[in-house]
Amino acid sequence: MTTTQPQVSIIVPVFNTEAYLSECLSSLTGQTLKEIEIICVDDGSTDGSGNLLDSWAAGDQRVRVFHRENSGVSASRNFALEKARGEFILFVDSDDFIERFACERLVRTAQEDHSDIVVFGGLTFPSVAWIDNCLATTRAVFSDGVKALFEGRGSYPLMCNKMYRRSLIEENGLRFNSELSLGEDNAFQFMAFPFARKISFSADMLYHYRCDREGSAIATFYSDRMPKLNKHLAVVSYVVRSWSEKGLSKTYGKQLLSWIISFVFDDLQFVSFGDRISFADKLNKLLTRFGLDQLIAELEPGEQEVAHFILAHQEMGASTSISIVLTCCPDEDVAERSFTSLANQSEQRLEIIVVPGRYGKGRAERWQRLDPRIVIADSVSGAIAAARSPWVLQTRDNAVFQWGALRELEEVGERFHADVVACPDSTGLLRCRDIARVVETNMGCLLTTVGQAEPDGPIAFEPSMASDLLFQSVSLASTNKLVRRDLMIRSHVDSMNECGVGVCLAKASRVCFTPRRLMGFCSYTFDTSWINGLFSTGFEPFTLLDATFSSEVNVRQREIDNAVLTKLMAEYRLMKANSNKGEFIKRAKQLIEQRGLLTAHDAGYYFDQDDYSDALEMVQRDTEDYVAFEIDARIERLGECIASVESAIGEKDRELHYVYGSTSLKVGLKVTAPLRWMVRQAKSLLRR
């Protein structure tokens, strides 16, 4: 063992990381700063990690190895802190590595700034965006530890991107809480930062964080949401109790509450209603006990909205704001995503009426067990008849809504006293457009609006003001619209199919359109029920739509034809990779011929030239031509994939060169050689 006083004690907890350990230790023993000690705590490894550690220790006296029974990462770090002799403490995970000049730069920064903590940058591999966002990227120095904790990027939740002055840890009795199985790093920052006299932030990218190892902390992070939330609640409870005992919550209670909200919010959006209510009950009791509940009113409006959602402050009673009529699609995973995005909206006064159809009976019954707001109906008309909220949204469970989307649509509708509120979809399939610009472009005049809150914000107008551009601008889809229930009753609409939407739009006293893309589609599988339903009913929705506007057929016919084509082409784009495409094209051709869409009008008749071109291309192919077209398209996509792979290989080459240097770059080139050979063979095949 070296007798020289080390400047930095590097603490490395080790548990079954034999495959990565040498890379880690090589980066540590190769530091340009030689006055270091490397304290490795073997936490009961069952692979060859222990023997490998002993081998490294035999070759470098700065490596100190301790073998212990498995007790967890926190206990291992605490044990190492008792053994540490350096002026500074650096924590490195045994499957990661650091730059060879890391210690030298960190010590220099700490000495120049007289800092107790130095926060620095790094890279994840493979890249994980949220972790990259938790690493420092700018140079700064704080004299207020709490301000640094809440305002400095990289201050929490990670342990690996910080170097601590050992006197800060020992003088304040700082240790890791061994009872926390997840989030112990985060908790440590809340114990340490308030007592630091100065904290430096460095933009140097010094740490390389591995994110793809099975059993790693990041893998645990992405496990089931509810167990993770309960572990995070334990972290919150520990921090709140500690800050209260030290008198910090009286001064910094508002900042602490903001952190709690952001800490649990992301996961709470993806748990069931019942689980969220149970979690809210526990968190409410904790906040009330320590007086933090009184500070919610002092938060920013956006934070207040999130806090009310997390704490389930909206009453679930007879008064609901929005009735959601949800029909089921075939894809189970997509359906779960869609349902979760609706059930966990910021607006919680929801009535969710599920129409299972032939796909979703078991799914609907499971949802009903998890969420008391769920009602199951046999049909869409029955669901709409049962709806009791002022607003109705009819959608399929292949659409995903942004958090807060329903409340935003509802508030816009109430502000402008609108009967219908619409928004564009993020995927652009519905072809929604800024209707004011559409009217100006196509009619050479300005849309007369009855209300616009701000430039490029929501606008409200009477349907007649949009002439024959209304349907095409906001679409005949129901998924992107809230409709007042009393308008549906007055208009005798019992289903928000194309006919129902068209009637409601035409008979609304006021329509509101917000340009914000608040929803999108997450399913690219095609369900033939829509187009088959048209044939089984003799095209009843469009026939009824035509009949509704028979007195103004010259005005509305173009709009209906455009809407039909847009709906058809949206489905066509969704189903291109689906096995039912042959059946769809057959049905689509019949629909186009039935309405004479491409024979009665020329190209200038159609609002969207892409829709017209796609439809023309589709109907002009017979089955054999279409198969040939699909083969050509797949070859083209293969070529695009090859180009993408080549680009990725080039990027990896650059990363290897940056991270490992020229020697390992040669090794990396050999590793990717088989893939390169496959790319060359594929290119050769394409040329033939």
Image (cartoon, grey):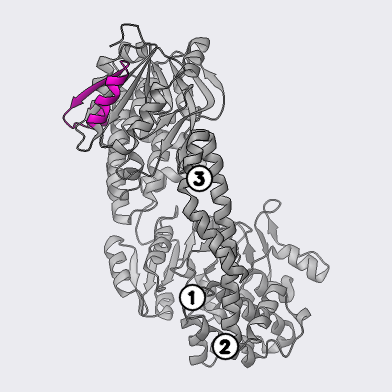
Q: Secondary structure at mark 2?
A: helix
Q: Residues within 10 Å of mark 1 (few under 14, many from 20)?
A: some
Query: Which tag, 1 or 2, sits closer to the chain's start?
Result: 1
Taking the image as shown, residue 141 lies to the left or right of residue 284, namely right
> What label sits on residue 669 in the rendered view?
3
Q: Is residue 218 magenta?
A: no
Q: Residue at x 66, y 54 (%)?
A: 457
Q: Which residue is mark 2?
A: 623
Which quarter shows the C terminus? bottom right
Q: Which residue is mark 1?
A: 578
Q: Which region is colored magenta?
A: 50-75
Seen from the viewer's position, the closer of residues 578 and 94 is 94
Q: Is residue 49 visible?
A: yes
- Observer-side mark, 1 or 3, equals 3
Up the image or down, 76 lies above or below 332; here it is: above
Seen from the viewer's position, the closer of residues 604 and 625 is 625
Distance, label 1 to label 3, CA atoms, is 37 Å
Residue 248 screen position, x and y as percent: 37, 21
Q: Secondary structure at mark 1?
A: loop
